[in-house]
Image (cartoon, grey):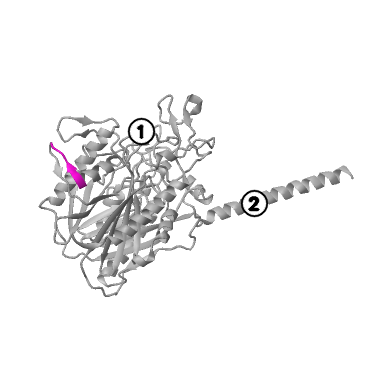
Amino acid sequence: MPSFLKRHKLLSCFLLSVLILVLLLASWVGYRSIGPYRSYRADLMKPAPGQSTRAGTLEVGAAKRDITPLMDKYDSWVDADNNARFEPKKGDTYTDKNGNGTFDFVWIAGFNNNRPAKGVHDPLWARAVAFRNNGVTVVMVSLDSIGIFHEKFIDVRKMIDPSLGIDHVMFSSLHDHEAPDTMLIWSYSPLRPRFDYKYLELVQKACKEAVEEAVRNLQPTDMILAQVTAGPDGYLDDSRQPIVYDNVIRCARFVKKGTDDTIATVVEWGNHPETLGGANSLLTSDFSGYWRDAVENGVPDPHGVKGLGGMCIYFQGCVGGLMTQLHTTVPHRNGVDKFKEASFEKAQALGENLAILTVNALRGEKSWRPADTQVAVAAKTIFVPMSGLFQYGILLGLVHPGWYWGKGKTELDAIRIGDLEILTIPGELYPEIADGGIESPEGADYPSAPIEVPPLRSQMQGKLNMIVGLANDELGYIIPRSQWDKKTPYAYGKTKSPQYGEQNSPGPDVAPAIHHEALALLKQFHAAQAGTKPSP
């Protein structure tokens, strides 16, 4: 055979192989980008506009499930240089308990990847509170978790017993930086992930069980509302300009009808549970656990309070920005001791100080009992534009799977229980979007007047308005567009690098989209309750 025919045949085979590989790769990317629950849409408004409802007695139920990993099922390890990271090349060793020849660890989320847990300091929980009145049943779940993507919560909704008559379930993560990785980000190495899918299934099962038990525990209830400012001094810092906090504790206590016996206490406040820092190797709910325990059981002298009993459920507020206690000096209630460095003593002091404020506010003269305790709920699937690495991760089905032509599918909810109104946000909202204070600093990438106005909380109609973050999803930081800053010159006088935040955000267009959709949902929600149609 002439040589040119051989070369032609080889070239044809090579091109055919390349074409097949391209088609296989395209098919794989296409399959991965479809994502689960492609046709799933939340589009709920109950009571519906014009629907006549009869106000009855508010019923509330609560339940919880332990979501702490069973450490006996995982390998243990020895940290040779005590840097909280598993590095065999530096002398770290592990005990292969199941004899499978590989290390099976609980990977702690937050801060750095490759941070295996050595044990458990205190349990992690899924806590649920259910509300029913005037023909509407809604459940809210709070998780001691770093965050969970939207499709995993849809899984849980589909698992729940339909005979319970639940109209909607809202899930929220506390963004606990000392809990297992549930987002496939912190599990050993980005190139060699060792994600624990079985743990995520454990969390989902616990959510299902807590939701169902909370509904089965429903009983007639009286409602008490209050709010109180916590800090910033001694409680939290805003580590990014502009300095704006979500530092008001908004509290709701639900007691058995005609008694002072607590069923549940719901609190909302914005601060990262990361008091232990990135060198900690013990699983813990951080200050959140101390706060809840102290609300339930009380705080001893000096300057303590008697507990309220029942179950305390903490929902995360607006933590973007970044709301943290890492650099805060937290005082002990004894007026003598102070804690600045990462420690469990600091976490306990912060949690107990929050509990004292919470209990005193709910027992104080400014607390009130709403006469109207009707329940309403709205849920809406929305699509928000993604950019950067987040966009490629979605396209490849690695994180937040489901590609919608450059957008990600997520959800907003609005819930009303009498004087209490709740708006949910699917990520870490910057407080200035919730309460005002957006700036357009010189040097930012998109100079303009603030886009995300008016502030969301100002458009809510409850006498007490909670904005719950990381709800039904975790999109990362939701940054005002006029404050977005990745390119030189940097804003706020930064010269070597910009402020922290953008690397953990899905893009500059997410905040305007979420703000716009949230305003639209609130308008529809309020119009439905008023029995009118919203204006365009």
* Residue at the (65%, 50%) spot, across then down: 22
Q: Position of residue 409 (x, y in %)?
A: 44, 57
Decide which of tag 2 and tag 1 comes sooner along the chain: 2
* Quadrant holding the C terminus: bottom left
Question: Residue 166 falls in which quadrant of the image?
Answer: bottom left
C-alpha span from label 2 to label 1? 44 Å
Q: Note whether 48 is above or below 249 in the view shown.
A: below
SS of the residue at dot 2?
helix
Q: Inspect the image, locate mark 1, and give the three-letter code of the amino acid beneath it.
A: Asn
- Marker disc for residue 280: 1
- Report how many numbered discs are placed on residues in the image: 2
Q: Nearer the viewer, mark 2 or mark 1?
A: 1
Residue furthest to the left:
365
- Would you say residue 518 is visible in this rendering? no
Q: Tag 2: residue type?
A: Leu
Local SS, label 1: loop
Query: In which image quadrant can residue 327 be found?
Result: top left
Q: Residues within 10 Å of mark 1 (few under 14, many from 20)?
A: many
Residue 490 position within the rendered picture, expressed as x and y whole percent measured from the top left: 39, 37
| Residue 83 in the figure: left or right of residue 231 | right
Q: Left or right: 112 with respect to 378?
A: right
Note whether 485 is above or below 96 in the view shown: below
Q: Please state which of residues 99 and 16 is positioned toward the viewer in this rendering.
A: 99
Would you say 389 lies left or right of 275 here?
Answer: right
Between 216 and 395, the one nearer to me in the picture? 216
Which residue is found at the position 22% from the left and 48% from the top?
Answer: 249
**Circle number at residue 24:** 2
Where residue 139 appears, as percent x and y from the top left, is 31, 59
Q: In the rendering, at what x and y percent does residue 209 appear?
A: 36, 56
Q: Write down the region rendered in magenta.
A: 296-301
Which quadrant holds the N terminus? Answer: top right
